[in-house]
Image (cartoon, coloured by chain):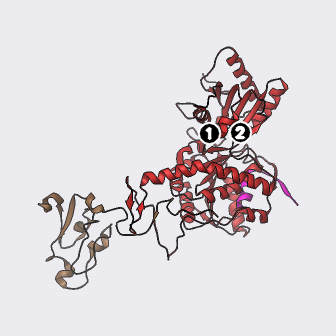
Chain colours: A red, B brown
Amino acid sequence: MSDTRIITGNEAAALAVKLVEPNVIAAYPITPQTSLAEKLSTFVEGGELRAEYVRVEGEHSALTVCISASTVGARVFTATSSNGLLYMHEQIHWAAGSRLPIVMCCVNRGVGAPWSIFNDQQDSFSQRDTGWIQIYCRDNQEIIDTIIQAYRIAEAVYIPVMVCYDGFVLSHTMMPVEIPDYGKVREFLPPYKPSVDISPENPVTVNPVFFPWRRENAEGVLCDGYMEKRYKLQDALLKSTDTIEEVSTAYGQAFGRDHGGLLWEHMTDDAEIVIVGMGSIAAEATVAADSLRKEGIRAGVVGIRVFRPFPRKAIATALKKAKVIVVFEKCMSYGCDGGVSSDIKSALYGTGIEAPMHNYIAGLGGRDVKARELADAVKETITRIDSGTEENETTWLNCHTG
Amino acid sequence: MEQRDKYISGICTPAIGEAGKTGDWSDLKPVIDHSKCIPETKGKAACFLCWLYCPDGVVTMSIPVEIDLDYCKGCGICAEECPPNAIRMVRKVECDE
């Protein structure tokens, strides 16, 4: 019998973490992640979850605790938002370089300055190049399912996974969520085995200084230099797209819900206008596409689920037939374009796809983005292109200065 | 079950000189005047502050005290801490001559 509850995104995340049974949780509360950290500490304190909950003095320490515990074979979890994530930055690189399958939730929030507690995706976007897998969720059901999948992905490829979902829009909004069965989760997720078993009988040196050149170790084996280790991370990340898709399919078979491996599509088969987004804004775009279709505009949506590794091939395939591409996003590469649109452009280079692409920055710092506004922006784009504007400067939606 | 590759991360077998012979980073090297060294003059285990303070663990707690120059980075802490000033930091080029 299915167990469906009406819960917030943070509650969905907490229930997912309870189901995967981590050995160690270390988190520091920060809005809008706070109720997730609180729920988990309640589970541990009440004996519902047998894990060590380490109370730390900040996010840098939270991730350091996870790094140490994961190194010795513990399954770990942490979560943060915004400036908390930025405070972890050094250790975020360290976790990926150490090839530790840590799973972290980033409850997306704008970063300071100036202060905002509200949603956009600048926080996790700014950690794009750290070597983590990043998956963006579009609703609360996807949050609970993605966290369970994230552990299986991370522990198969030895790369940490950041499960990102929009603050308040999802974290504090209640939706019906089907809670996966405990026994089935046990079957789906085998126990974690570290890449090297560490024990007092098998002492190791962890991350000593690496040199530019390759070098023999104490046993005379020629070992990697720094560059080889870094190449292995990139290689594993690129190959992880297969694992991510396999895990998504396997999850669908076991639990009846496949949210799309690398990306998902909504009415793209005959779409001339393809809207691209990531997270909840992409879900909102499906409502916009539906209303545009009622007006006779053949619109569809591509939702990017996995932002790193960036699904270049899948994106190019999904956009092959598009006549116009419109990207809505909540992150900005300051001094350049929106972060998502830049990556899409790079993925399309050399593919022969030359559809004009218009980029909208929307909903920064929690500014509401309605489906109606997205639909209007798409119509404005069509007007511009019809009047001969192939490419356009990035437009900041509903942003009025002066 | 996938094959585990133990060389994906920077986990190494513990060994002396995991980072190579770091002694060649130094400009200065410690030279011991054994006639002043406390354990040696007293003929018993005493002092050994050089052994205690060495950040690289290259000083032996023995009579005579020995310093492994293959891994001594020449910081001079031993010379600074030595109560009878038995250790002197000498420029390497100068010693080689």
- The local secondary structure at tag 2 comes to strand
Question: What's drawn in magenta, residue-wise?
Answer: A1-18
User: Measured from the top left, where is residue A167 in percent x and y?
Assistant: 69, 45
User: Magenta includes A9?
Assistant: yes
Quarter of the image with the C terminus of chain A is top right
Identify the residue shown where x is 28% and y is 78%: B61
Dot 1: chain letter? A
* Amino acid, disc 1: Arg
User: Could you say whether the residue bearing mark 1 is in a helix, strand or loop?
Assistant: helix
- Is disc 1 surrounded by few (<14), some (14 to 19) or many (20+) residues within 10 Å? some
Q: Are marks 2 and 1 on the same chain?
A: yes
Query: Is residue A327 or residue A316 the one in the foreground?
Result: A316
Chain to which the residue tagged by mark 2 belongs: A
From the image, tell me which residue sits under label 1.
A312
Instruction: Answer with the quarter of the image where residue A179 lies.
Output: bottom right
Q: Which mark is residue A303?
A: 2
In the rendered image of this protein, does residue A391 appear above or below residue A70? Answer: above
Q: Percent x, y for residue A75?
A: 63, 64
Answer few, some or many: residues within 10 Å of disc 2's Cα (few below 14, many 20 plus, some between 14 and 19): many
- Quadrant in which the N terminus of chain A appears: bottom right
Q: Between residues B14 and A38, which one lies in front from this camera angle? A: B14
The answer to whether residue A57 is visible is no
Q: Is residue B43 magenta?
A: no
| Residue in view at x 76 percent, y 36 percent | A284
Side (left or right) of A234 relative to A48? left
Amino acid type at mark 2 = Gly
**What residue occupies the far top of the structure in this picture?**
A387
> How far, Cα to Cα, is label 2 from label 1?
13 Å
Question: Left or right: where does residue A180 sit relative to residue A21?
Answer: right
**Residue B4 location (% of width, % of height):** 57, 63
